[in-house]
């Protein structure tokens, strides 16, 4: 049985600087999509906006990733072209 995605907000463009990272309204699960053909966009997760880094990962062009995170952690991208939305799974 496959999961279905439960939307909990509107999709937004990810900010591209550490001081403007977003928590997606305290989301614990975020759907991220790289809307570009670029394979070198890096996502950074921080404990707080502009705070200590938790980790980074690269999202290949044209793909979707689901990021599970601590509600207070914030996220930003290394370049424009990434969009994200707070989600959950059902079924």
Image: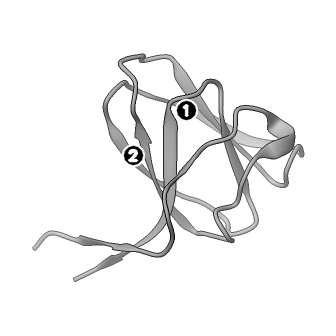
Is residue 85 placed above or below 89 in the rendered structure?
above
State the SS at label 1: strand
- Tag 2 near tag 1, CB within 8 Å: yes
Q: Assess disc 2: are there few (<14), some (14-19) or many (≥20) residues with their C-alpha within 10 Å of its C-alpha.
A: some
Give the quarter of the image for residue 42: top right
Q: Which mark is residue 57?
A: 1
Regarding mark 2 in the picture, which secondary structure is present there?
A: strand
Q: Is residue 49 above or below residue 58?
A: below
User: Left of 21 or right of it: where is 12?
Assistant: left
Q: Residue at coordinates 68% horizontally, 71% vertically from top-left?
A: 26
* Residue 12 versus residue 37 in the image, above or below: below
User: Which of 76/10 is in front?
Assistant: 10
Packing grade of label 1 (10 A; few <14, some 14-19, many >=20) is few
Report the quarter where the N terminus lies: bottom left
Residue sitting at 39 percent across and 32 percent down? 35
Residue 3 falls left or right of residue 44: left
Residue at image position (22%, 83%) is 91
- Looking at the rendered image, the disc whose residue lies closer to the viewer, 2 or 1, is 2
> x, y (%) of residue 85?
49, 59
Residue at the spot of label 2: 65
Q: Earlier in the sequence, mark 2 or mark 1?
A: 1
On residue 45, the disc is none
Q: Position of residue 5 (x, y in %)?
A: 30, 69
Residue occupying the point 88% across, 43% down? 50
């Amino acid at each position: 049985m496959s999961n279905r995605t439960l939307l909990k907000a509107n999709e937004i463009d990810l900010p591209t600087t550490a001081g403007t990272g977003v928590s997606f309204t305290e989301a614990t699960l975020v759907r991220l999509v790289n809307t570009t053909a670029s394979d070198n966009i890096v996502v950074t997760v921080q404990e707080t906006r502009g705070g200590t880094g938790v980790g980074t990962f690269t999202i290949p062009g044209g793909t979707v990733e689901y990021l599970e995170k601590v509600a207070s952690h914030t996220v930003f991208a290394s370049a424009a072209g990434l969009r994200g939305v707070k989600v959950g799974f059902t079924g």
